[in-house]
Image (cartoon, grey):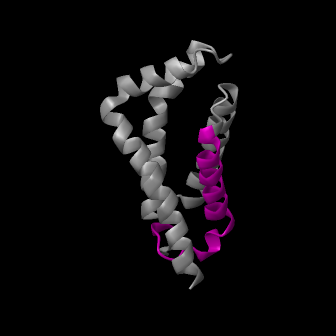
């Protein structure tokens, strides 16, 4: 039964990440402009912020896809965890405290996916040649 619980955790964070990317990619320019506007007061240079704002939806989409199909699960969890840490840092810089709980929950899900990976039975990762 641990494998079913793990599957729900993995799919939960995977669907959330895929959804974040999926809705942002079609409106990529508007998303990037909005993010840049939100960070005008933050001490972040544009040469970091602009590429990040364009890359973020694709990273979210890819992480979500990898987690849903269960391929490279541990690596996806590590990348996702560090992505959440970057988002938490940015959110703190602009004092958007209402966004932090959601980001902290996403971070926790990535930690759970990484830590309990031995229960990853329903995944491409679990298929042996």
Instruction: Choose between 70 and 26: the one closer to the eye.
Output: 26
Q: Main secondary structure of the magenta part?
A: helix
In this view, the residue farthest toward the bottom is: 1
**Residue drawn at (30%, 34%) of the image:** 26
Look at the picture and state if 87 lies above or below 65.
Answer: above
Instruction: Choose between 95 and 4: the one closer to the eye.
Output: 95
Residue 94 x, y percent position in the rendering: 65, 25
In this view, the residue farthest toward the front is: 98
Q: Which residues are magenta?
A: 98-125
Residue 23 x, y percent position in the rendering: 35, 41
The N terminus: image quadrant: bottom right
**Residue drawn at (49%, 27%) of the image:** 53
Residue 9 x, y percent position in the rendering: 54, 67
Instruction: Choose between 115 and 20: the one closer to the eye.
Output: 20
Residue 122 among magenta residues: yes
Look at the picture and state if 74 lies above or below 128.
Answer: above
**Residue drawn at (51%, 79%) of the image:** 4
Report whether residue 79 is seen: no
Residue 57 among magenta residues: no
Counting the numbered discs, the total is 0
Instruction: Choose between 118 and 85: the one closer to the eye.
Output: 85
Residue 89 x, y percent position in the rendering: 69, 33
Quarter of the image for residue 87 reads top right
Report whether residue 20 is seen: yes
**Residue drawn at (47%, 70%) of the image:** 123
């Amino acid at each position: 039964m641990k494998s079913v619980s793990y599957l729900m955790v993995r799919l939960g964070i995977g669907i959330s990440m895929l959804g974040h990317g999926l809705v942002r990619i079609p409106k990529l320019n508007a998303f990037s402009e909005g993010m840049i506007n939100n960070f005008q007061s933050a001490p972040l240079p544009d040469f970091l912020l602009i590429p990040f704002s364009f890359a973020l939806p694709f990273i979210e989409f890819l992480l979500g896809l990898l987690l849903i199909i269960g391929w490279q699960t541990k690596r996806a969890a590590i990348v996702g965890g560090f992505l959440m840490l970057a988002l938490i840092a940015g959110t703190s810089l602009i004092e958007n405290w209402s966004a932090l709980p959601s980001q902290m929950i996403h971070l926790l899900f990535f930690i759970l996916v990484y830590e309990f990976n031995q229960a990853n039975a329903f995944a491409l990762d679990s298929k042996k040649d």
